[in-house]
Image (tube, grey):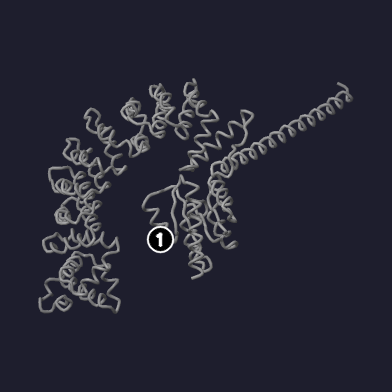
Amino acid sequence: MSPLTIALIGVAGLVLLNLGTAVAMRLLLAYQRLRERSARMRMRMRESVAAFAVEITDELPRARTSFERRLLREAMLETAHELSGSAFDRLAVSFADRGFIAEAERSLRSPRVLQRIRGAETIGELGGLESVPALRRRLGDRDPLVRFACTHALTRVGAEGLLDEVLAALSEGETVFSQGALAEVLLDSGPDSVSELRALLGDPRHPPRRRLIVVVLGELRAFEAVPELVAALDDPDVELCARACHALGKIGDPESAEPLVAVAMDGARPWFVRTAAAGACGQIGDPRTADTLVDVLDSEEWYPRNAAAASLVQLGDAGLAAVCSRVDSLEPESVAHYWGLLDAAGATAPAIDRAAAGERRVRRFVTAAARAGATARLEELAGRDTPSGRYAIGVLRAAAHDTQPARATPASRPEAVAT
Amino acid sequence: MKVLVADDSMVVRRLVCARLAADGHEVFEAEDGQAAVDVALRERPDVIVLDRQMPKMDGFEVCTRLRQDTTLRSVGILMLTDNRGEHTLIESLERGADEFMSKPFSPRELSVRVRLLGSRQTLAQTS
């Protein structure tokens, strides 16, 4: 090859490279412009949809191309997600008028899984009861995620009387769905579903479903379900029983305090059931449960004892009075346990003030707690020149003497001075 | 009335700002907690609509910082949050929020609450 040919090939190569670079640059610029344009359009859509939702304008932006239509649909969905009340209703009506719900129903029949899921989600976000038949047809979908999206959408649009069907659609291959996901679907059905849930709770064929329903009834604060939940306390399924205790605690009906106290005191029950029952008593806040909780406070097992101590703290003065009245018969570690939780709740300093002011029962409790080793708060107060500070010094000295019985004599016990 | 809207969600900011601007308020925006504090110190708004969860500084922290500033101690704060739980409500009030609304929210309700909050703050300042 002659040098001239080589030079010509080199020049041609350079020209081609320049041309290629120029084309690539143009394509890149065009792509960037397209992105900027679509970002501007998306922003305009969002602003127009927001203005429509808050009733500044009566016109939604026009969407001529399929791309604009997609942007409008997305803007309406993301805006509706943040809204409630009349603004949401306004968007939902316009969304259906524009044919987006009909499109979503058609997507439910798509051969592509993602399309079917997207269709169900769209209906769940902005659809209504008109779409219930289309969603029900997909409850038998072979893909579990589509079934899940359809059940979620059904509960979100407020379909009533379908919970049995919804749960059946989700129970096939239960390992696919976590209990949390199932609970989310049931919770979305809201308080209107309580009567249906009560009826389903009575069906003993599906133990996992019953346990889930009990939790959901508690989360929904379903006051009218208290009789069924109290009945569940005697169910042979101990896990159901523990969850019923938690649910009753959340609902907080004082009528359920008595059966819960009976469960908390029943030594034949597993520890976690008694713990749940003791904890629920505190949530209900009925002072009549205080005496029984003091019995549970003396339990040898840590968890029931801790739940009883926490509940007594929640009961406030009634809890303190119950502990004070029986402090002489309680185990030192039970007293210390209650004191610890009382202290965490910021209630030991007021108790020490009351003791320093001369309340005999509270004095006995503070002294017992100090003897059990719960002295941190007293030591903190002991440095102050206040009645409580001086009282704290006395109690600490008495406690110190009690831990050295050989040297202590009744006459010399500083607690005698303090009390 | 000057209103600051602090929320990291652009959709929420658009909705709230559009409603409040249509009500005749002068509206400022901030997309994170730090920006909210900066704008509040610069513009001295009468009311702040504050999101609970924001980057850089959450709504609670913003509330605390604003209440520490003597000139902003009396600004009306409406906390807008995803969580309607008792804990969030109580903490919002303890940190110095005057009003509480949960998402999803009604723009009409927000509009009325902001107006009443502004009037209340004005009355408190004049009396």
Q: Which residue is mark 1?
A: B94
- Residue A73, by quadrant, is top right
- The vertical placement of A328 against B8, above or below, is below
Work out which quarter of the rendered image holds the C terminus of chain A and state it.
bottom left
Using the image, name the chain to which the residue with label 1 belongs: B
Residue at 14 percent of width and 77 percent of height: A416
Residue at 79 percent of width and 30 percent of height: A19
Q: For this view, does A388 lie left or right of residue A69?
A: left
Residue A230 position within the rendered picture, expressed as x and y whole percent measured from the top left = 19, 41
Viewer-nearest residue: A292 or A284: A284
Give SS at disc 1.
helix
Residue at 48 percent of width and 32 percent of height: A122
- The vertical placement of A281 against A169, above or below, is below
Q: For this view, does B75 lie left or right of residue A392?
A: right
Which residue, as the protein is rendered here, is positioned at the far right?
A4
Work out which quarter of the rendered image holds the N terminus of chain A and state it.
top right
The amino acid pointed to by label 1 is: Glu
Q: How many marks?
A: 1
Viewer-nearest residue: A394 or A283: A283
Residue A210 position within the rendered picture, expressed as x and y whole percent measured from the top left = 25, 34
Residue A384 position within the rendered picture, expressed as x and y whole percent measured from the top left = 30, 77
Q: For this view, does A382 lie left or right of residue B84?
A: left
- Residue A233, by quadrant, is top left
Which residue, as the protein is rendered here, is positioned at the far front?
A58
- The vertical placement of A123 against A348, above or below, is above
Q: Residues within 10 Å of mark 1 (few under 14, many from 20)?
A: few
